[in-house]
Image (cartoon, coloured by chain):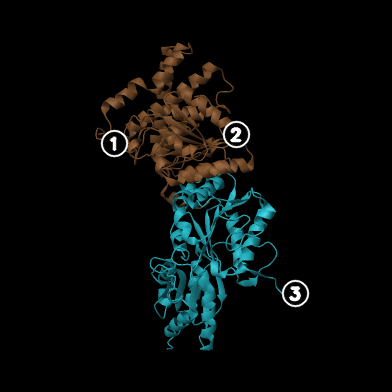
Chain colours: A brown, B cyan
Amino acid sequence: MTSKPETGGVASTEKERWLRAYRQIVRIRVFEEQVNELYTRALMPGLAHLYSGEEAVAVGICEALRIDDYITSTHRGHGHCLAKGASPDRMFAELLGKEAGYCRGKGGSMHIADPATGNLGANAIVGGSVGIATGAAFAAKRLGNGRVAVCFFGEGALGQGSLYEVMNLAQLWKLPVIYVCENNLYNEYTHFSETTAGTILGRASAFGVESGVVDGQDVRAVNAIATRLVQRARAGDGPAFLQADTYRYSGHHVGDINREYYRSKSEEQHWKTERDPIALHGKWLMAEGFADSAELERISADARREMEAAVKFAIEAPYPSVDQVNEDIYA
Amino acid sequence: MPERELTFAQAVREALAEEMRRDSSVCIFGEDVAEAGTPFKVLSGLVEEFGAERVLDTPISEAGFTGIGVGAAMTGIRPVVDIMFGDFLTLTMDQMVNQAAKAHYMSGGHWKVPMVLRTTLGATRRSAAQHSQSLHAWFSHVPGLKVVLPSTPYDAKGLLKTAIRDENPVVFFEDKMMYKLKGPVPAEDYTIPLGVADVKREGDDITLVATSSMVQVALGAAALLEKQGISAEVVDPRTTWPLDEKTILDSVKKTSRAIVMDEGYGRYGVAAELAAVIAEGAFYDLDAPVRRMSAMHVPIPFSPPLEDVTVPTEESIFKAAKEMCGQS
């Protein structure tokens, strides 16, 4: 596994940069396949919300960030954590409630946090982290450390009023925060058109917040707009709002198997065969002569090996001792 | 030299100013906290000394700026978030209960939230049901939060300085009827630890455990009781969490009678919890059942004669204590 450079992409060639993005997308996909496997084998307690299908959003954004930039994530957060640099063995350990996990087993799938990669934590309250990300941007500006904060949320969070409170403040105070709305079309089991009046970008422009929309299945397009928005935030030009159109391949959670009452199989099939971020980016890499099919297959095989080893580590890792239940309540 | 006296509001302001001079990461957010200095004028002068970068007027968005406080606290700022009336705490609940209180635990101890939420409590200001509540019990119920209830100018300064230096989210309740109360406050730097009760008056016959606004009322009742030959001890826990159970129990074991009084609602409230602590820890030392006195279980009414009966008074405490001590 390659270590993450200080500044995504800048130090590497075009070819290395886009191969790295491909590798990151594939790693997230394989990670989630392993989660599905662990869950269906009843090895994983609790809930599992898979990010499969949406990987190019997290990777395109995080490749535009520094390791010390902040992110906040969601209940569907494994992809954000990996894209920001988290290690899969400690992530799987957390998913299984083991002491070696990022949160010593106390957070689980929906709460992975990692100060070393600027991950302020995944949040299981929809829209729950909008204040935290904006506050981190306030601290970055006040302390003058040049960091930016990225707040990931799904289009379901557009229904939460606190988002509008903090966007108003972020624009008034010119804070370096980027709100990334991953529009995967479904608020749990309800199409977003049934819950969202007006337009998505209209919400940002109401506050004068710089905004844009991008094809979330195209990692290069996501990275291009993210790089621009991150640069302007870092330069002191204030917050931005990015709508990334994407698709959730699985159900709301792993147990959401029968989905035909809210979306059709043909719709799912269309996204998987025509709009898959791995296939799209792989095709481009080959067309550019950056990789052949053997190279791409090697990347997939490496990712499978890495994730299988990480799962093995997590399964063999011990649970926390019961006396730890009372630790970490207060600092 | 006579002791210097400050009002409760001046003591709060001095604590903030001292901590802001000591630590440049301390910032204040809230509605009308800058030039206006809040409607209670508690913060007057701070923006002039520390600037608009550190004393920030916000829109009327309690959930938004409290959430910003949580994130800022996690990343190197020590925010003091101002919630003008304690009633508006309802708007901050997700940020305080699901975010601030849990970030340290859920992250396995990796992230910390060193923020203070300053707010008010207390009725009898003729402000009706949405500007008069005492909601500190709600926060005392949540693991991960600390809750502070100063009852004198001296305690207000020392406890607020400790709260600002604490590594955890602390909710700091000020009785708005007490802002003009004067008392001795040293000019020098001092702190009071959280979780240490204070015996505000010593006595032998009955313990009055009182919080915040009720401490001064309990002291008034104790003075009335003295004239009847009843010696009342007044114990002020000062923080509902952490809670100094030992000082409360030691007092009750000495006096064998206890009334607990708190301006929050009695049902499932702070008074109920303190009574339970006494029942569990000193049952065999009691000569009478523990008595609770707290706000009536009604929305606070506007009309003065109606509002006045909703909170315990010196007279009602005096009467209850006399009965418990066998005098009618």
Between A30 and A202, the one nearer to me in the picture = A202
Query: Can you give x and y, in whole percent of width and height, for residue A196 in the image?
Result: 37, 39
Closest to the camera, between mark 2 and mark 1, is 2
> In the rendered view, does B278 fall on the left or right side of B203?
left
Q: Amino acid at mark 1?
A: Asp
Residue marked by disc 2: A234
x, y percent for residue B149? 53, 65
Left of A188 or right of it: where is A77?
right
Q: Quadrant of residue B290?
A: bottom left
Q: Local crowd at mark 3 within 10 Å, few (<14), some, or many (≥20)?
A: few
Disc 2 is placed on an element classified as: helix
Q: Where, quadrant-wise, is the C terminus of chain B in this rendering?
A: bottom left
Q: Are marks 3 and 2 in contact (CB under 8 Å)?
A: no
Residue A256: which disc? 1
* Quarter of the figure with the N terminus of chain B: bottom right
Q: Chain of mark 3?
A: B
Residues at discs 3 and 2 both on one chain: no
Tell me the quarter of the picture where residue A55 sits. Answer: top left
State the residue at coordinates (42%, 33%).
A182
Residue B1, numbered label: 3
Which three-letter amino acid code belongs to the residue tagged 2? Arg
Residue A96 coordinates in the image, percent (x, y): 38, 39
B67 up-or-down from A314: above or below? below
In the displayed structure, A67 sits above or below A323; it is above
User: Residue furthest toward the right?
Assistant: B1
